[in-house]
Amino acid sequence: MINTPERPYLKWLKDEIKTAEGRVNSEKYQKIKIGDEIIFSDIRSDDFIKGIVGFKHEYTTFEEMLKSEGVRNMLPFLSDDDLEKGIQVYQNFPGSERVKKFGCVAIRIKVTESKLEKVLD
């Protein structure tokens, strides 16, 4: 995950503005269960959030996930009417093509610990 001033994903998750984190449902995420501890971190810094998985919803496509969870709940910088833009955001993430094989997952996290420094430009 990469945080920017325009898209502070970790802060949005901590502040419950972003209600779920979307990921390709690779083997790693298939093993996660409600109640498990999980960490999301920024690949450019030491920033992270740690918490407990509150829900895990599995989907076949990014479109299905965004329609069900709500575009704005997953990507707070977009409106719920921006479905195509939301799909493009997820398709632009590295490794997103694996969704065809694994599907995707929306994970709700109740943050228990965080380290969020000033977001780098």
Image (cartoon, rainbow, N blue to C red):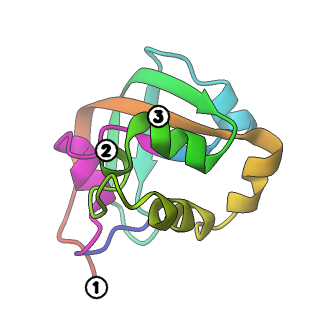
Looking at the image, which residue is at 79% across and 49% down?
100
Disc 1 secondary structure class = loop
Q: Nearer the viewer, residue 68 or 56?
A: 68
Above/below status of 60 relative to 48: above
Where is residue 64 drawn, in percent x and y? Answer: 58, 40
Q: Which of marks 3 and 1 is nearer the N terminus?
A: 3
Q: Report how far apart the C-alphas of labels 1 and 2 lie in the structure.
A: 24 Å
Residue 13, by quadrant, is: top left
Q: In whole angstroms, how far apart are the C-alphas of marks 3 and 1?
A: 32 Å
Residue with the mark numbered 3: 68
Task: Say what amino acid the circle numbered 2 marks.
Answer: Asn
Range covered by the magenta-colored residues = 6-21
In what element is the residue under mark 2?
helix
Which mark identifies residue 121?
Answer: 1
Q: Which mark is residue 73?
A: 2
- At 22% across and 75% down in the image, what residue appears? 5
Closest to the camera, between mark 1 and mark 2, is 2
Residue sitting at the far bottom = 121
